[in-house]
Image (tube, rainbow, N blue to C red):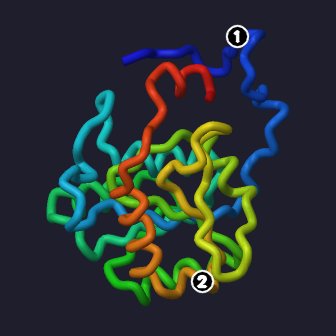
Amino acid sequence: LAIYPRGVRPADSPRPQPADRTPAPRGAALLYFPQDTSQNVPPTARLAGLPLAERVIRSAARAGYSTIVVCTENTDSRSAALLRSLAGAIPGVLLAAADEAALTALGATGEPFVTAIGPGTVVSPALLEMAATIEPAPGELRDVPAGGEWRQSGVLRVAIGDATELQAVAAALRERAGRDELLPSGEDVAKGR
């Protein structure tokens, strides 16, 4: 585990400074599938002291997402309790036990696009900020790159109209999670590659 000070970047860092990045538009929407029968890592599993689901939801809130729709259809009781707690503590978190509830919540945002994250994926606020600026073509489930050398991150950007088939979005996330691809090392992540 490496702990880095907030807001401090080495002068020689190839990554853009926070002032150089375009922030996520306020009002961005996130669609989160925290648990799936194909994943054996529950959203309650802890990473550096926090449950995975809490890391995803807090990252989205820090990145400026005002609506975070969490699909709870396949969650176990322990995960559901955690998600209810987070929904009560973090503004904009909406729990959807059925596809219809999730679609209604997404439609109410007025946003043309949604960022989708599947189970077992944890991302930084910076990646979610960048994701919110991507505009996929109609019918496209666009992969959000994790960096110049890493074209996939396990996060998708989708037009709201194309997200009406939530199970298709969940299946696309599942398919990407199951790919046997080279992932960035800890050093790659730390150096922003």
Taking the spot 38% from the left edge, 76% from the top edge, the residue there is 96
Report the residue marked by disc 2.
Answer: 162
Few, some or many residues within 10 Å of mark 2 (<14, 14–19, 20+): some
Please tell me in which quadrant of the rendered image residue 135 appears. bottom right
* Type of amino acid under label 2: Asp
In the picture, residue 182 is in which quadrant? top left
Tell me the SS state at disc 1: loop
Give percent across and percent down for residue 110.
Answer: 70, 78
Marks 1 and 2: in contact by CB < 8 Å?
Answer: no
Q: At which x and y percent is residue 123?
A: 49, 43
Is residue 148 placed above or below 14 in the rendered structure?
Answer: below
Q: Position of residue 150 (x, y in %)?
A: 58, 41
Report whether 164 appears left or right of 132: left
148 versus 190 height, above or below: below
Residue situated furthest top in the rendering: 11
Question: Would you name the residue on which mark 1 appears?
Answer: 10
**Foreground of the two, 178 or 118:** 178
Residue type at numbered disc 1: Pro
